Amino acid sequence: MIDEAVAALAQAGQAGRSPRPDGRRREVRQLFRLVLRCVRAGCAEPVIRPSGQIAAHCYAAGTDLAEIQGSFTVLAEVLWRQLAGALAGEQLVTALGLLAAITAAGKDTMARTYLALATRDRGGGQPAQEPAAAAGESGDRPPGIVQAGVAGQVGIITLGDRGRRNAISAEMAAQVIAALGSLRARPARAVVLRAAPGMDVWSAGHDIGELPAGQRDPLGYDDPLEELIRAVRTFPAPVVAMVHGTVWGGALDLVLSCDLAVADETASFAITPANLGLPYNITGLLHFHGRLPVNVIKEMFFTAAPVDARKASQWLLINHLVPQDRLESFTLELAATMATKSPLAIAVIKEQLRILSDYQPIAAQVYERVQGLRRQAYDSSDYREGLEAFAQKRQPIFRGT
Ligand code: KGA
C-alpha cells in the first residue's frame, strides 16, 4: 500500500519537497501511521497535533501548503480504494466516513497552522496558537476570544471578545476556524455559533482597523473573514447562528452563510459597506442574492440601517424568532435534532446546495468589468474617508470621488 501511495504521489507531482524515493516513503509511512492511529481510536483526534507539527516544519522549509495537503489527499485516495475493496455495506460507509473525517481534520489543521504562522510573519507579532488553545478544550489554558465546547454531539462556538464587540479580526477568524476544525475532527454533528452570554452585540463585523487602507481589494479571497465564511459553508454538518444582539457588516454575511439562523427580540441586522465607502465583494453579494429578494438586499445595502428581529423574520433573514429566555434551549434542541439524522446525507446535501448556489457562470470580461468597478470604489477618497471617520469616531463626509 505504501508503494502504491508513493507511486501515486510521484505521479501527482506532489512530493516535490523530498524528491528522493526514500524521503517520499518516510513521509507516506508517517502519514499512514497517523491515519492508522485514528482508525484504531475511532476518531480523527490523533491526527491533529502531528498534522500541525508537519505543517510548521514544512512552513519553515518553505514548502507550499497545497503540496503537503496534496500528500494527504493522495494517501486518502489510496486508502479509499483499499477500503472499498476490503469492506462492504454499513462497515464500508463507517470506514469511509472516518477516513474522510481524518483527512479533513489533518488538512484543516495544516491550513490553520500555516495561516497562523503566515499571519504572525506578516507582522501580527503573535506567536502561532496551538489549535487546542483556540478550541478551548484543554481546560488549563487561559480562555481566548473564542471558546469551543460540546453538548452531546452538538459543538458550540462562542465569540467572546467583549471589548471589541466581537469585531472579526484575523485572530478571531483563525480561532473560529480552528474551533471548527477541532469539532469537525470530533466529529460534531451540528454546530451552534453564538456570542458570549449577555453581549448586546453579536458581532461588529469585519475588524475595520484590519481593512486595507486603499489600492487593494478590501475583501479579497484571502481576507480572514472570507476564509471564515468558507470554513462555515464547507463544514460538513449544519452550522446554526444563534443571534442575541446586533449584527453588523460582514458578520451578517457570516450569519447568512450559516445553514440556519435563530434569533431573539434583541437581534438586529445591518449590512454597512455604504457607511465605509467599501465595494462589497462579488462572492459576498452572491451570498445575499442566494438568500434574499433583490429589493430587500438593496434596501439593506443602500440604507445600511439595522433591520429589527421582527422584520428580519418576515424577510426570512432568520429561520426562527424566539423569546429571549428560549433562545438557547430552542437553538440547542434544533441542533440536537439535526444531530440525530444521517450525518452523511446531511453533509452531502449541504455540499450539493453549496456547489449549486456557488455555480455562477460568468464571462471573463464581465468578471473583469465588475472588478474594475469595485476598484474605482476602493481606490476612491470616499473609502479612505470611511475608514478614517470610523477610526476618529465621527460621521464620514462622502463626496463621491
Ligand atoms: N472594527 C474594529 N473595531 C471595532 C469595530 C469594528 N468593526 N466595532 C467596534 N470596534 C471597537 C471600537 O472602535 C471600540 O474600540 C470598541 O470596539 C468598542 O466599540 O475601545 P476602542 O479602542 O475605542 P464601541 O463603539 O465603543 O461600542 P458600542 O458603543 O457598544 O457600539 C457598538 C457598535 C457595534 C454599534 C459600534 O462599535 C459600531 O458601530 N461598530 C462598527 C459596526 C460596523 O459598521 N461594522 C461593519 C464593519 O465592516 C464590515 O464588516 C464590512 C466588511 N462591511 O460593512 O462591508
Image (cartoon, grey):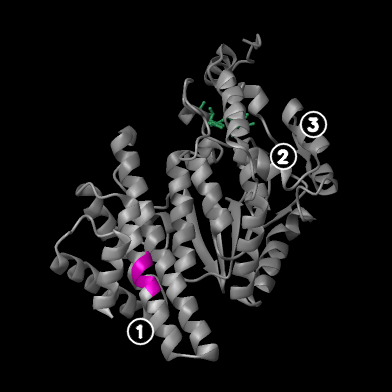
Residue under the point 53% across and 34% down: 219
**Which label number is shown at residue 40?**
1
In terms of secondary structure, where does tag 1 sit? helix
Task: Identify the residue under disc 3.
Answer: 299
Q: Quadrant of residue 98?
A: bottom left
Mark 2, Cα crowd under 10 Å, few <14 / some 14-19 / many 20+, is many
User: Vertical placement of 346 versus 366: above or below?
Assistant: below
- Foreground residue, 228 or 143? 228
Mark 3, Cα crowd under 10 Å, few <14 / some 14-19 / many 20+, is few
In terms of secondary structure, where does tag 3 sit? helix
Task: Identify the residue under disc 2.
Answer: 269
- Foreground residue, 159 or 326? 159
Evaluate whether residue 200 shows in this view: no
Q: What range is drawn magenta here?
A: 73-77
The disc, 3 or 2, on the residue closer to the chain's N-terminal end is 2
Give the number of the mark in front: 1 or 2.
Answer: 1
Q: Quadrant of residue 320?
A: bottom right
The amino acid sitting under disc 1 is: Arg
Gap in angstroms between the C-alphas marked 1 and 3: 54 Å
